[in-house]
Image (spheres, rainbow, N blue to C red):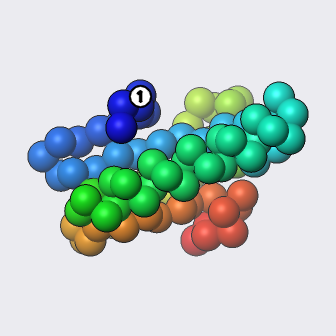
Amino acid sequence: MKRQCDIVSMNRRCVIEFDGHFHFEPIYGEDKLYQKKRDDESFNIALSSDGWIVIRVSYDTFSYKTKTFDATVIECVCETIDAQVPGVYKIGKEYECYK
């Protein structure tokens, strides 16, 4: 599978994806949203089943005003990477997994 990723660490076998509005809302139409969700799920399954950590962070954790992420989100991402447990981790209110 060939795909552009937001952040990749080959050493830690970790990928971080920042998911914008179009991952959750039909901005470009229902068909595009459905395809995006299918592509994301295929990506998640392929990497996590190969021993990678996949961290998905929803757009609602970022302040466009201050251009920063919520400190809790950064802490959660760091803890997830440090734990070195392969799998898919979703962070943010859109994922209903916000600390």
Q: Residues within 10 Å of mark 1 (few under 14, many from 20)?
A: few
Q: Position of residue 67 (x, y in %)?
A: 59, 30
Residue 6 sits above or below residue 91 on the image: above
Front residue of this view, candidates 36 and 8: 36
Q: Position of residue 15 (x, y in %)?
A: 35, 46
Residue 6 sits above or below residue 46 on the image: above
Type of amino acid under label 1: Gln
Q: Is residue 55 left or right of residue 37?
A: left
Q: Position of residue 32 (x, y in %)?
A: 76, 35
The residue positioned 74% from the left and 46% from the top of the image is 34
Q: Is residue 19 left or right of residue 49?
A: right
Q: Secondary structure at mark 1?
A: loop
Asked if residue 99 can be seen in this view, the reply is yes
Q: Circle 1 sits on which residue?
A: 4
Asked if residue 63 can be seen in this view, the reply is no
Q: Position of residue 98 (x, y in %)?
A: 62, 67
Position of the C terminus, as image quadrant, is bottom right
Q: Is residue 75 left or right of residue 25?
A: left
The residue positioned 70% from the left and 30% from the top of the image is 65
The residue positioned 37% from the left and 54% from the top of the image is 46
Front residue of this view, candidates 91 and 43: 43
Q: Which residue ends up furthest to the left in the rendered image?
A: 11
Front residue of this view, candidates 65 and 18: 18
The residue positioned 41% from the left and 28% from the top of the image is 4
